[in-house]
Structure formats: structure tokens, C-alpha cells
Amino acid sequence: MKLNIAIVGLGFGAEFIPIYQRHPQTNMYAICQRTEEKLNAIGDAFGIEKRYTSFDDLLADPAVDVVHINSPIHNHAEQSLKALNAGKHVACTVPMATSVEECKAIVEATRRTGKKYMMMETVVYSREFLYVKELYEKGELGKVQFLKASHQQDMDGWPGYWPGLPPMHYATHCVGPVAGLLKLQAEYVSCFGSGTIREELHQYYNSPFAIESAHIKFKDSDLSALVYRSLFDVARQYRESFEVYGSKKSFEWSLIEHEEHVVHTAKKPEPEIPEKVTVPDYAHYLPEEIQAFTTGGVYDTDENQHLSFLQGSGHGGSHPHLVHEFVSAIVEDRDPFPNAEQSANWTSVGILSHESALKGGEIIYIPDF
């Protein structure tokens, strides 16, 4: 039996259509988009018959098993809750929600309905993350001592709700890898705002900060992590990075996109400690039908570039891995990674970090989900 998939939001969302079309356990059943012209253009391009301009009409269709949400950030929680309550499994692009209360509501809904929820965090399925995870699981890192991640992006000119967004309100790309590698739960945060973005951007969210940097303390662990974010008025090439420091080996992200990353090995002669590494692709983890999508996608053609894909360098080949994990979790009736509780924890780190920054770095505890 194949799962009937419905994709909501067809900007970035269209990237996933051919993956679901070729995955051996899914049927790319329906698409949903408010603009009829765009809905039909995508539907015609991919040969998808079922098309909805109304999200509620889509949820009323009993044939839909899974809803994959790629709508604007402020719709994520509302749509996830509606879909779960309508008896559908939910995959949702990041972040899970815009408030801690919404995160709690989604976790509660998964428990009440028994349906699966997965936040589609790209970084924890990127080839770099899978490479470092492999080093960790083989014991090559030794004891992990510290984790660090950054997500820096110039979002000038982005539409809608982006102008002036507090940096940490979109933090899962750097929180995900530092929490996800050892499957740690963030216990509390302390965050500082630094610098000031230009005046006209303050009005949207009352947030002046150019950069927010947060320390995360993990529960039942001796580890902490540092994550930092910038969105406006900071000179930096796009960088979505994470770094891991171990007793035997450490992994550091390259400073310039497409350059090689660096692995440091302890106890070698000083000049030999660092070594540039080529991170392999992990397509072999996937069913053959979708392996090609780790290196290519819908938005590879020049006239078809989606900003997030262009700036994000294809999200590290993560898209087919995300799809396969989510589908496998439903088929095997297990929790996906990240599940609702983990997604809520990672998302809340960002939300509460911004709150901490507004209070001068005050320690704020993450609720237990």
C-alpha cells in the first residue's frame, strides 16, 4: 500500500514533488496552493490531477494520508494542528511554530491523534551532518566536548514577513545539528543581541539586533553549544555551518562555500593536525529510485532557481533523506527524527533565545514537552 501525499505551498514545496513521485512507498496525490494559476502550472508540469486552492477542502479529502506543509512560517502551527486533527500525518518545513504555546499544542495533538509529525530540518540530513554522525558513531571523534553552529544570510529583498525578523526566530538550522548529533535535549538558553539593524526594519518585530548569539545548556549532559544567527546588515556570504570538537578529532566548517571542510586530529605533529576533507554523498542510504535527488532537484535550471535552494546550496542533499525518514517512520509505525517533542525543543530554543536577548542574556528554561 502506498501513502497518498498532499503538498501544501508550491514555492520551495515543489522541490519535493518528484521525490514523492518516485519513492517506492508513496503516491504524489494532491497539491494545494492559494493562487490557481500557479497551482495549475505546477500540476500540469508534474502531471498531478488533484488540486486544491483551499487547505480545508484538502483536509476534507479522505484519500489524503500525509500532508507536507511548505507554507509561510506564520501558517505552520495552524496548518499542522488542523491536519493532525483531521487525522493526517504531518511533515512541516521549519520552524515548527512561532510560539512555545503552539509547539506544545502540536506535541499534544500528536499524542491525542496518534499521527506522526516531523519538522523537516534539512541540516540534520545534510551530507556534512551524516559524515560527522558517522565519525561520531565509529568513535573517531572520541568524547564530544563542544558544539557550535551558525546560520548567516542576507535577507534584504525577501518578501512578506521576513524584513526585520529576529534572527533567532528562524534558528532551527543551527540548533538542529548541535542538539541532533547526540540527540540531546536543550535545557536552558542565554542569548545576547549584538549590533543594530537599520531603523526602518525595527517596526515589524520590535527587534533591533543584527546578530543574536545563544549558549545552549543540554539536559543530563556536560555539554553546551554556541549558536549564532544574522539576517540583515551583516557582511557575510551565506553560511549554514556546524562544528564539533572531540577529544580525538574535531570537524570545522569551511569559511567559504564549496571549499573543503577541515578535520583536526589530536596528538599529531602540529602542522599535520588539520586536514582538508571531501565530504562524501550519502545517497546509498536511500532507495535507488530517489538517490539522484541528493545531487539535483527541480530548482537546478537557471530560470527556475528558488532563493532558499540557490543560497542554501541545495540544502546539502537532504531532501530525499527527509522524505525517506518520514515515510519510513509512518510505514514502520515509529517516531521520525526529529519527532514532535524534538522539533518543539529545537524551535523553542530559538523563540526563547530572542526573549533572553531582549532581557540582556537572562537564562530562560525550555519547557519540557
Image (tube, helix red, strand yellow):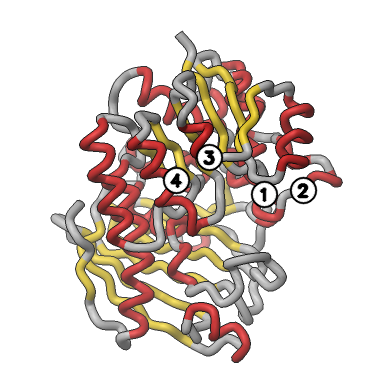
From the top left corner, tell me how far across and down residue 294 is, in percent: 62, 33
Mark closer to the chain start, 3 or 4:
3
> Which residue type carries mark 2?
Gln
Q: Are marks 4 and 2 in contact (CB under 8 Å)?
A: no
Q: Mark 1 points at which residue?
A: 309
Q: Give the Cα separation between the discs numbered 2 and 1.
A: 7 Å
Q: Are marks 2 and 1 in contact (CB under 8 Å)?
A: yes
- Left or right, 266 with reference to 322: left
Quarter of the rendering occupied by the N terminus: top left
Q: Name the residue under label 2.
A: 305
From the top left corner, tell me how far across and down residue 89 is, in percent: 39, 31
As displayed, is residue 207 above or below residue 59?
Answer: below
Q: Mark 3 points at which residue?
A: 55
As displayed, is residue 50 above or below residue 177?
Answer: above
Q: Residue at the far top: name it.
A: 1
> Which residue type carries mark 4?
Gln
Name which quarter of the figure residue 147 lies in. Answer: bottom left
> Which residue type carries mark 1?
Phe
Mark nearer the viewer, 3 or 4: 3
Find numbered disc 3 in the image and state the secondary structure of the residue it sits on.
Answer: helix
> Which residue type carries mark 3?
Phe
Residue nearer the viewer, 54 or 253: 54
Q: Residue at the far right: name it.
A: 303
Dot 2 alpha-carbon crowd within 10 angstroms: few under 14, some 14 to 19, many 20 or more: some
Mark closer to the chain start, 4 or 2:
4
Evaluate whether residue 235 shows in this view. Answer: yes
Mark nearer the viewer, 3 or 2: 3
Mark closer to the chain start, 1 or 4:
4
Q: Name the residue under label 4.
A: 79
